[in-house]
Amino acid sequence: MVLKRWLVGDPLKTAQARHERLSKTIALAIFSSNAISSVAYATEEILLVLVLAGAAAVAWSIPVSLAILFLVVVLTISYRQIIYEYPEGGGAYVVARSNLGDRPALVAAAALMIDYVLTVAVSVAAGIAALTSAIPSLYIHREALGLVAILFIIVMNLRGVRESGKFFAVPTYFAIGGLGLLVIAGTIRSLSNSGEIPPIANPVETETLTLFLVLRAFAAGCSAVTGMEVISNGVKAFRQPESNNAATTMVWMSTILASLFMGISWMAYHYGILPKSDETVVSQLARLTFGTGAVYYAIQIGTMALLVLAANSAFAGFPHLSSILARDGFMPHQMATFGDRLVFSNGIIILGFFACLLLVLFQGDTHALIPLYAIGVFVSFTLSQAGMVKRWLVKKGPHWQTKLIVNGAGALTTGIATIIIASTKFMQGAWIVFVLVAILLLMFQGIRSHYKAVTEQIALDRRGERPPLPRRNIVIIPISGLNRAVVRALDYARSRPGEIRAVFVDVDPEESAKVKIQWAQWGGGVNLIALSSPYRSVLGSLLDYVEELLEKDQNTWVTVVIPEILPARWWQSILHNQRALMLKAALLFKDRVILIDVPYHLTR
């Protein structure tokens, strides 16, 4: 408990929730770090595909980047409409459920949840790649560094939204400033060089430049728009007026994203930068623009910080989405419960666990994770836009035709992008995402069915009729000998209504005789029953006795009072109570059996 308070902080009162709301500047750092950070690797992913057709094919990076820029504009306008129409937040899941039904909504939710896990893994892996580009000796430790980074982000998010936002805002804005400086300085330099591209080594051409290859490059570069939906998921986290502040932050984020992405793509094309296995494209551009001095290292450190902290936006989106699903009965109810610091702690911990697992499975390799990335978020993009199209067709309202055109364009463009991404990345690993979505859908439906069945079974009778009260309650105390723990349990049992019986299993005649003598002195008149066990099965004999009592009378309840010794040291627990644990495990699921623990605390 002391360690938890040191790491997470003191609990916050529920009344303090409104003080945990975010300003636009802090919200930008929390919600947009994922989208903005993708500029550090989106251009590189485009080039990795195009370079397969030789250096000349790299020229297609600009048209591909412009197509992605068009996507950014369409999504910005579309999600602003969603923010105003659904100020309670929830993003694609809420939009799809209210307009398209449960099944499409759950597909959107499953796809988004998978993408949030991938966001954490990809962002941290890319951030560590930026660090190892500057300090190559750390490359062999990239997995360990990634795990440490994720654990740090988990702890910071468990401390609360506002506190984590303030902490992460400084490095986020520092990184944005560094990348902005790189784009401005690099663009000025490229213009002063009259657009001349320095000679570069021609890579080995392994594929022919085809439309499919260009589409693959587009699919790879679409990682630049992942994270754009996070603001619409967390509208309620903003200060009032929530929708206006969220919509403004959306425009800020998109402007920064578009400027940095196009700037880096242009510079990479102009300077003939090609991907390297041991150095990122951003690192090459920074080294070419500023040399290897302080500015270069500042940009690398800032980029690393931005990429690692980009995972923070997923920690804002995943727990909130999980809480909405839990509220609707599709996830465990615990996911909708606030932790001590007014955050959804369970969602934060689960996201962190699966992100760490993914990072280890893929050995911290960004390029290995990218094929799985983006497909989930584009599925949710398409479903949310399609849901808004149906909403305008049904609801209409002021300027509904214009809004319909905007969301229709969004549904069309994201739908096409989804098909391209799915078809080009399917064999590279995107099929795994489809399998995981199917598994999550089964899980959602299973949880919902379970909760529905539970509700039906525990609901009070509408006619106000109570179930019949038990006519008889038999209290039994299983013992193996007599000591203070047993006497304490006996005293408690005597305070309860019902017929009390002490029960022991006779496996040793001499020991049984001693127990009977002691019981005559300490039993307080309670009946002692000895159960014979020819095969020395203590647990089996006790279970048979309880079963016999239950079968004799269907209106009889059996209360089992179990004496337990609680040692002074946690590690001593393995030396005690093993038979009691087995008895509880065996009786827990029996109907009309009540289990009561009576602890006896040791002091040394």
Image (spheres, grey):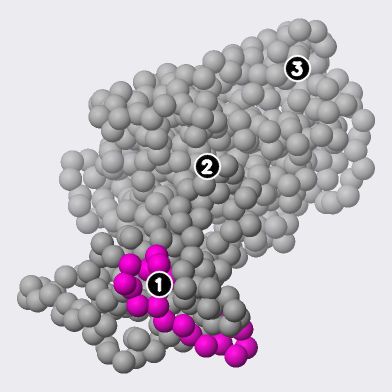
Mark closer to the chain start, 2 or 1: 1
**Residue 485, position as x, y percentages in the image:** 46, 58
* Residue type at the position of mark 2: Thr
Label 2 crowd bin: few (<14), some (14–19), many (20+), radius 10 Å: few
* Disc nearest the viewer among 2 and 3: 2
**Residue 184, placed above or below residue 403:** above
Label 1 crowd bin: few (<14), some (14–19), many (20+), radius 10 Å: few
> In front: 582, or 230?
582
Residue under circle 1?
520
Which structural element holds mark 2?
A: loop
* Disc nearest the viewer among 1 and 3: 1
Q: Residue at x 43, y 71 (%)?
A: 519
> In front: 383, or 34?
34
Q: Residue at x 88, y 49 (%)?
A: 206
Residue under circle 3?
286
**Residue 436, placed above or below residue 476:** above
Label 1, label 3: how many angstroms apart (C-alpha)?
88 Å
